Amino acid sequence: MKFELGRCLLNERLMESGKSAEWLAKELLFKPERVYDFIENKRVMPLKIAISIADSVGCDVRALYELIPNDYEVMGD
């Protein structure tokens, strides 16, 4: 099954872990603006960054975004 990314759930995962966006930025040596861009859906996290974020906040990488099933199937797949 294929999926499309829905909204970013990073803010929810940060709240669940008791951490802040500023803490995460410092932890991963990012500017806070970059983390806020992810939270506000201005930027999509590259996989390597998403894995690091998930590890830092203690969640599965798939929990960082809403996953919307895409039922469209390409002929021959």
Image (cartoon, rainbow, N blue to C red):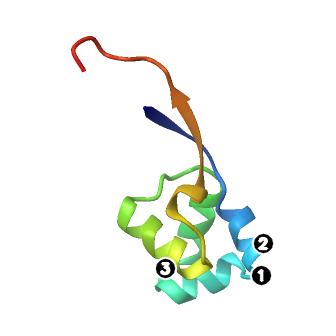
Residue type (three-letter) at the residue carrying disc 2: Met
**Residue behind mark 3:** 30
Nearest the camera: 42 or 12?
A: 12
Kind of element beneath mark 1: loop
Number of labelled discs? 3
| Residue 59 image-quadrant placement | bottom right
In the rendered view, would you say 6 is above or below 37?
A: above
Q: Which mark is residue 41?
A: none
User: Residue 28 at x, y = what percent?
Assistant: 48, 83
- Residue at horizontal 49 percent and vertical 35 percent from the top: 4
**Residue behind mark 2:** 15
| Residue 26 image-quadrant placement | bottom right
Q: Which mark is residue 18?
A: 1
State the CA–CA distance, disc 1 to disc 3.
19 Å
In the rendered view, would you say 2 is above or below 48?
A: above
Q: What quarter of the picture does the N terminus occupy?
A: top left
- Residue at horizontal 50 percent and vertical 53 percent from the top: 43
In the rendered view, would you say 73 is above or below 67?
A: above
Kind of element beneath mark 2: helix
Of the numbered discs 2 and 3, the one sitting upstream in the chain is 2
User: Residue 30 at x, y = what percent?
Assistant: 49, 79
Of the numbered discs 1 and 3, the one sitting upstream in the chain is 1
Q: Are marks 1 and 2 in contact (CB under 8 Å)?
A: yes
Residue type (three-letter) at the residue carrying disc 1: Gly
Q: Nearer the viewer, mark 1 or mark 3?
A: 1
| Residue 15 image-quadrant placement | bottom right
Residue type (three-letter) at the residue carrying disc 3: Phe
State the CA–CA distance, disc 1 to disc 2.
5 Å
- Residue at horizontal 58 percent and vertical 58 percent from the top: 64
